[in-house]
Amino acid sequence: MTAKSDEVSKTAPRAKGRNVLAIASGKGGVGKTWFAITLTHSLVREGKKVLLFDGDLGLANIDIQLGLMPKHDLGGVISGRIGLRDAVTPFPDGGFDIIAGRSGSGSLANLPVTRLQALSDDLIQTGKSYDKVLIDLGAGVDQGVRQMTSLANTVIVITNGDPTSLTDAYAFIKVTHMARPKTDIRVVVNMAKDRKEGEAIYNKLLKACEGFLKISPPLLGVVRADPRVSECIRSQTPLLMRHPNCDAAHDMEAITQKLLEG
């Protein structure tokens, strides 16, 4: 066994959560965290018990977008001061729980392999009491992101019309597919002018995936650009609470229904 293959075997997960979904983007700035929060809230509205895990230690901001000040966060878990279950923070207004990250505390990639594996195992165990566990991944494809991705049966890749967003989304899909070819990868186009534009953006990504990877990740949905989204982010209020009947809210509900249908 080569040193490289030995490293891969050490980072392979000992367990996988059938109820775990990972939200990825390849790059920042495409609305990944907003999408993760809104999908979590939408799943709750469908009667699901949901845990949202902030997997981005470098730029953690789920708690910020929700206006929360958690007593405990992932930083305390990684340092060994508390267990993962102790870091669970309820968000009563939305009816779901979060595990907050800690901005500026580094990346999961900086953790030793054994500590990263232990964190993964703890998340799987904690997630057993939930219908769904959503992981808001950090941007990029470093070791921490790959490890968290490996826990999920379904990975949702968020992109938009920015060429760099499409390039990075493709890179993420490629790395994930090469590591675990059977991963259920689906695509969401965010901030599209309309559904037609969103589908055109998706088709560009699909063409690259089919041409180079010989796979066809399906389109989970298109979220139209909506000024109410940025308004809700500024006010630290979930979209489905503040503007449940806007275009983006309807798009998210359609995505939720499609996801639940399988």
Image (cartoon, rainbow, N blue to C red):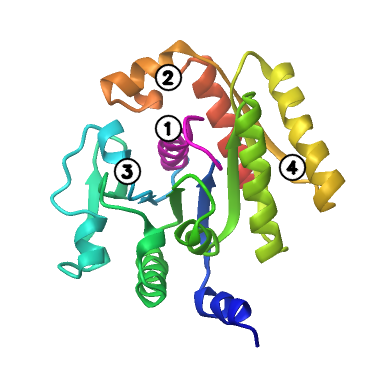
Can the viewer see residue 167 in this picture? yes
In this rendering, position of residue 248 left or right of residue 186: left
**N-terminal label among 4 and 1:** 1
Q: Which residues are magenta?
A: 26-45
Q: Where residue 153 sits: x, y (%)?
A: 59, 60
**N-terminal label among 2 and 1:** 1
Report if the CB atoms under discs 4 and 1 are less than 8 Å apart.
no
Q: In the drawing, what numbered circle is on residue 108? A: none
User: Alpha-carbon distance for marks 1 and 3?
Assistant: 12 Å
**N-terminal label among 2 and 3:** 3
**In the image, what residue type sits under mark 1?**
Trp
On whether residue 246 falls in the magenta region, the answer is no
In this rendering, position of residue 31 left or right of residue 87: right
Q: Residue at x 36, y 54 (%)?
A: 107
Q: Residue at x 71, y 62 (%)?
A: 178
Q: Residues within 10 Å of mark 3 (few under 14, many from 20)?
A: many
User: Alpha-carbon distance for marks 4 and 1?
Assistant: 21 Å
Report if the CB atoms under discs 2 and 1 are less than 8 Å apart.
yes
What residue would you read off at disc 2? 229
